[in-house]
Amino acid sequence: MHLSYLSPVGSFENGVPLLSPAQCFEKLTNRKEIGFYKLHEMDQLWSQTQQIGTAFAAKFKNFIWVGIGGSSLGPKAMAEALRWSHIQVLENPDIQTLLATKKKYGSFKDVGFVFVSKSGTTIETLATLDFFNQELAVENLDLKTQSLVITELKSSSLYDWARGNQIPILEIPLTVGGRFSVLSSIGQLVIKLGKMDVSAFRQGAASVFEAEYKEKTLYPLTQFFMDSFKRHDVLTYFWYYSDSTYQLGKWLEQLWAESLAKKESPLYVAPAPIVSLGANDQHSILQQMMETQLKKSVVIHRFKSSEENAYQLKTTQFSETDVLRNKPLSSLLKTEAQAMTESQKESQHPVCEIQFEKMDESALGRYFMTYQLVVGMLGEFMQINAFNQPGVELGKVITKKILAGRS
């Protein structure tokens, strides 16, 4: 993961004393109450996941992962990026999806269930757990013997259920917020369920702290967004030029929106994140992006695996595709990604291009830690608390009141 192009800085107001990316990094990593940036150093967490995860992965052919928000977006992004079909992530408690899942498997005999909730009180996750408990009982199966729980190690509905039924529990540290938890036992277990290298995932996260990476990628990327804030951009478009990586953008969308959209900033309002898939959304959202008068920045993610595959079209049937004859079919998407960057430059839209040599455990660890640090550093830059979500809590309270009134 490295920057291959970064647009020149646009104009913005002067006179406000501001922190540099390096100063923001120092302020963030001096906060003892925040633990996500230390996850790669937590040896006990990694060894525990290695032990418990290895045993759990060996027991089942397929896995159903149940969570929502920070408990599911990372695992879903990882499973799709690595193109795994044996891990299904269930987020929304949509009964149609749950019944379709029941029909898909026929029997849950060979399915392992992972229930994830940082607080242990997430109603959507607990309701889905109850659904599977009821459905497995119909098969004379015991959900408790096919489950693993990831949560904080403190009393809660989910923790107490697991503890009382001797279900293995993996920890989300108290200092790690839900949307910053993908490098905790959550992401570590996903890698284990895929029978891949957890140490490579860990090393990828750790590499972000190396001096060269900070100077060439982390700090310039953060500065790009800082300049966007100074210009008072309204929108930030995150483009992903690979089908399997779109969910990485959805993970980033939550991280960005819940962390940076805060009323209390004395300096700036964070631009709204818009996640787009290239080339699909060049036939939809691109018109609005190119011609709206709202200020914007554009970040383009490109992936070598989708751009440099050797498969060729030996024959073509159409005048439009004749240009692709005897060329790698992947050159089409590659060219469209290149054209996107060039069109933004010509339109004088601030644009940043990020390239990925491969998509594996190490790349995922690096991607997640990079953007978590960027968002945390931007919180320091804005002088806000990037680690709470007061705007989300009201809806949760009202939901519980309505349900209680109908019971």
Image (tube, rainbow, N blue to C red):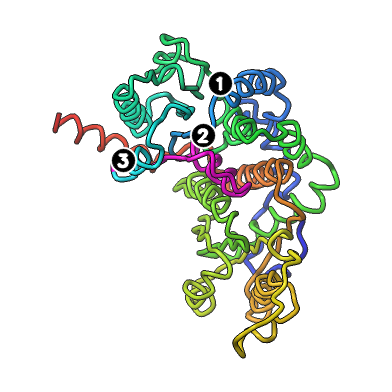
Q: Nearer the viewer, residue 294 or 255?
A: 255
Classify residue 134 as left or right of residue 231: left
Distance from Cα at disc 3 to Cα at disc 1: 28 Å
Residue 72 is situated, as x and y percent measured from the top left of the image, at 49, 39
Amino acid beneath label 3: Leu
Amino acid beneath label 1: Leu
Does 347 appear above or below 95? Answer: below
Label 3 Cα crowd, 10 Å radius (few <14 / some 14-19 / many 20+): few
The magenta stretch spans which residues? Answer: 69-95
Residue 150 seen by the camera: yes
Does 66 appear above or below 230? Answer: above
Residue 385 is situated, as x and y percent measured from the top left of the image, at 53, 39
Classify residue 120 as left or right of residue 331: left
- State which tag comes first along the sequence, 3 or 1: 3
Does 66 appear above or below 336? Answer: above
Distance from Cα at disc 2 to Cα at disc 1: 19 Å
Q: Nearer the viewer, residue 306 or 350?
A: 306
Amino acid beneath label 2: Asn
Q: Which mark is residue 396?
A: none
For this orientation, the residue located farthest to the bottom is 319
| Residue at image mark 1 | 170
Q: Residue at x 55, y 65 (%)?
A: 233
| Residue at image mark 3 | 99
| Residue at image mark 2 | 62
* SS at circle 1: strand
